Image (cartoon, rainbow, N blue to C red):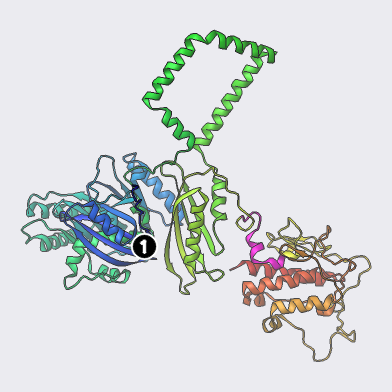
């Protein structure tokens, strides 16, 4: 009789559960993070450690992530000031601070750090560093293997969320003695996590008061402020018969948390709800914004995925196999050295005339191979990794920074914006990038965190964290995935490819040099040259299209306003047809019609010239008119002006004017 295989239920990665031990029991909170908001699904108490019961509760909610809160005293907490700089520089400065302050007290997988939220009009930034030393192994209420750990002081930081209240935000567990709080001062905010004596209520209150007073004194608070702290602690804890467990929230934070959290029901006694589930809710709030790295500590280092060769080597390294191999090696060493070495010498002498020279070459080759192997094991192809990230970023993703950490717990951190594209919402595009990175096999466990959308709802700021599991893996991307084969410009604007030669990224004007994309200065573009025997256009000579004078009476030249009313694309198409009525159709190309001649000109067979006419030359544009256009309108007009620049019979002044207008349009198309 075969035993039925039990399948693990599907998990929802957007559902997060937090477990926190307080008052001698486990407090559980399940919620869903959406941007910087948290929707509470259920709260539950577990009177004792019962992993099967907790696991069943987690599976009933399909929790994709489980966070266990470590109490104060088991985790080292350091807060440090940071300069006001861009996010990438802040991350680098925070890592330098962590290396200087931790000094190897915990392995990388037991460290966590994050840049805290800035307050309004605050010039400096603050960072929080956590380290979980080995040996402080907590009680874990679940059998789940994907558990992540954080500290109660990290939950305090998530509840604070950039506010700077006058009173401290304090968590005190009267049963275990854990004390974690955040105290604001003129330079920012200070976090502290410690333990106090709980043998009696009096000693407990004295310990809490002394710790708060010492922290306030170190933060340069006034004596009046310190005396007020003592009175507040005495009023809250002085009448207790046993040490109290309380989450002390300043009044202004109640309003902020009510806006950030939904689904919780504090009932008639909100303080009692916060005392029970406030720290666990704060641990969930770390996943709703930039404090997510504070809840990423792991008890064991990430498991490696050994190759087939590594598994074979491990199997052969067992004691029994080692003894067998040793016996075989001994027999070979005793009975066959003369035969083996004699045969080897005969072969070498027959094949190598100069043995010493070849031996020196082999030794040099061995040294090179050893050097290459050391470089392979101690370095990564960073350009390849960044290329893999970019190729798996779909259209609609705008990358801002890519940070790669090499070493234990190798990770990559990506930040940017997700913009609505081709009918897909920004969140769908961000999660599509997460799926594509997972499918490469190069990255493991990618996770996207989305911030709130902009005022229009069509753009999200996101952060994506992933582990680099196989940096040397080569993935063969097809043309639709590889931006080196099919660039983003070619995908967004295939109509401009009609004017490009293969291998070029700019537009080619016959006889006028090359207009390249990187050139922003109009003066750097060579003026078009007239072919021998060509005449200046009637418009340049001051004649009207009919040739009866400078201009027809009452006729007004068409300007960019005509493009707004008629449409830039329709105008360009009608001008093209009017100036080349007899031009035959051209064969199709991969991204549009047209064929490029070796000299850069694009003309059909049998029609080698295209004479400029009054209707084929667009009117002059002013900087104010170009500035009023949208980038899409400017890109459409670029094709019309590029066609006009290729016309024959243009005089120098008209060519210079068209080139200046084309550069203005190109600069406007770049500015989004």
Magenta-colored stretch includes residue 493: yes
Q: Please provide percent x and percent y for residue 95.
A: 40, 47
Residue, far bottom: 554
Report x, y in % for residue 622.
69, 76
Residue farthest front in this picture: 1
Q: Which residue is mark 1?
A: 288
Image quadrant for the C terminus?
bottom right
Instruction: Classify residue 169 as left or right of residue 94.
Output: left
**Vertical placement of residue 49 versus 254, above or below:** above
The residue closer to the viewer here, 172 or 168, is 172
The boundaries of the magenta stretch are 482-496
Q: Residue at x 60, y 49 (%)?
A: 476
Quick one: label 1, few (<14), some, or many (20+) residues within 10 Å? Answer: many
- Snapshot quadrant of residue 159: bottom left
As drawn, 577 above or below 335: below
Mark 1 residue element: helix
Q: Nearer the viewer, residue 320 or 438?
A: 320
Do we see residue 348 in this rendering?
yes
Residue 275 is covered by the magenta coloring: no
Q: Residue at x 55, y 61 (%)?
A: 394
Quick check: 584 left or right of 405?
right
Residue 543, quarter of the rendered image: bottom right
Is residue 117 at all visible to an observer of this figure?
Answer: no
Is 136 situated above or below 118? above
**Residue 314, percent from left and from top:** 42, 31
How many badges with numbers are in the image? Answer: 1
Q: Nearer the viewer, residue 437 or 551?
A: 437
Percent x, y of residue 114: 37, 53
In the rendered structure, the answer to whether residue 216 lies left or right of residue 608 reads left
Left or right, 31 with respect to 334, comes to left
């Amino acid at each position: 009789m075969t035993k039925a295989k039990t399948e693990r239920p599907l998990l929802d990665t957007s559902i997060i559960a937090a477990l926190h031990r307080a008052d001698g029991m486990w407090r559980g909170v399940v919620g869903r993070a959406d941007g910087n908001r948290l929707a509470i699904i259920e709260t539950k108490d577990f009177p004792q450690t019962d992993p099967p019961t907790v696991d069943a509760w987690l599976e009933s909610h399909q929790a994709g992530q489980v966070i266990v809160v470590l109490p104060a005293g088991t985790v080292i907490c350091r807060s440090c000031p940071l300069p006001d700089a861009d996010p990438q520089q802040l991350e680098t400065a925070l890592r330098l601070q962590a290396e200087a302050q931790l000094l190897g007290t915990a392995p990388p997988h037991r460290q966590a750090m994050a840049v805290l939220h800035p307050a309004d009009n605050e010039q400096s930034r603050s960072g929080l560093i956590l380290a979980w030393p080995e040996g402080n192994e907590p009680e874990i209420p679940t059998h789940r293997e994907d558990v992540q750990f954080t500290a109660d002081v990290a939950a305090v930081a998530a509840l604070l969320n950039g506010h700077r209240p006058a009173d401290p935000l304090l968590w005190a567990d009267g049963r275990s003695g854990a004390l974690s709080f955040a105290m604001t001062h003129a330079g920012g905010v200070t976090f502290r996590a410690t333990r106090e004596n709980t043998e009696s209520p009096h000693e407990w209150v004295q310990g809490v008061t002394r710790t708060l007073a010492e922290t306030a004194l170190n933060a340069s608070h006034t004596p009046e402020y310190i005396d007020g702290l003592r009175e507040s602690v005495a009023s809250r804890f002085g009448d207790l018969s046993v040490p109290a467990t309380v989450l002390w929230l300043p009044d202004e934070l109640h309003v902020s948390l009510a806006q950030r959290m939904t689904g919780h029901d504090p009932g008639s006694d909100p303080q009692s709800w916060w005392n029970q589930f406030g720290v666990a809710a704060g641990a969930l709030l770390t996943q709703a914004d930039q404090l997510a790295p504070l809840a990423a500590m792991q008890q064991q280092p990430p498991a490696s995925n050994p190759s087939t060769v590594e598994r074979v080597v491990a199997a052969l390294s067992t004691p029994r196999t080692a003894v067998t191999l040793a016996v075989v090696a001994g027999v070979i060493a005793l009975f066959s050295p003369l035969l083996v070495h004699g045969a080897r010498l005969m072969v070498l002498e027959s094949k190598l005339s100069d043995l010493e020279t070849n031996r020196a070459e082999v030794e040099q080759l061995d040294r090179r191979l050893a050097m290459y192997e050391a470089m392979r094991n101690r370095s990564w192809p960073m350009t390849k990794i960044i290329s893999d990230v970019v190729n798996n970023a779909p259209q609609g993703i705008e990358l801002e920074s890519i940070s790669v950490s090499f070493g234990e717990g190798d990770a990559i951190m990506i930040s940017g914006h997700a913009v609505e594209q081709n009918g897909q919402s920004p969140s769908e595009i961000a999660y599509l990038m997460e799926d594509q990175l997972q499918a490469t096999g190069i990255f493991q466990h990618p996770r996207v965190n989305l911030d709130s959308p902009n005022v229009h709802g069509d753009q999200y700021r996101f952060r994506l964290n992933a582990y680099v599991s196989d940096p040397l893996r080569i993935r063969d991307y097809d043309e639709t995935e590889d931006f080196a084969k099919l660039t983003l410009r070619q995908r967004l604007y295939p109509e401009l490819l009609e004017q490009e030669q293969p291998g070029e990224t700019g537009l080619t004007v016959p006889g006028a040099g090359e207009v390249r994309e990187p050139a922003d200065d109009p003066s750097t573009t060579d003026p078009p040259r007239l072919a021998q025997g060509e005449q200046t256009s009637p418009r340049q000579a001051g004649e009207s299209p009919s040739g009866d004078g400078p201009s027809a009476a009452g006729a007004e030249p068409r300007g960019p306003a005509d493009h707004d009313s008629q449409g830039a694309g329709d105008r360009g198409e009608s001008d093209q047809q009017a100036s080349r009525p007899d031009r035959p159709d051209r064969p199709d190309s991969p991204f549009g019609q047209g064929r490029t001649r070796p000299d850069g000109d694009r003309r059909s067979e049998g029609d080698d010239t295209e004479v400029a006419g009054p209707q084929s030359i667009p009117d002059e544009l002013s900087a104010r008119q170009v500035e009023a256009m949208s980038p899409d309108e400017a890109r459409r007009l670029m094709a019309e002006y590029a066609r006009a620049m290729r016309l024959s019979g243009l005089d120098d002044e008209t060519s210079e004017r068209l080139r200046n207008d084309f550069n203005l349009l190109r600069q406007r198309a770049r500015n989004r």
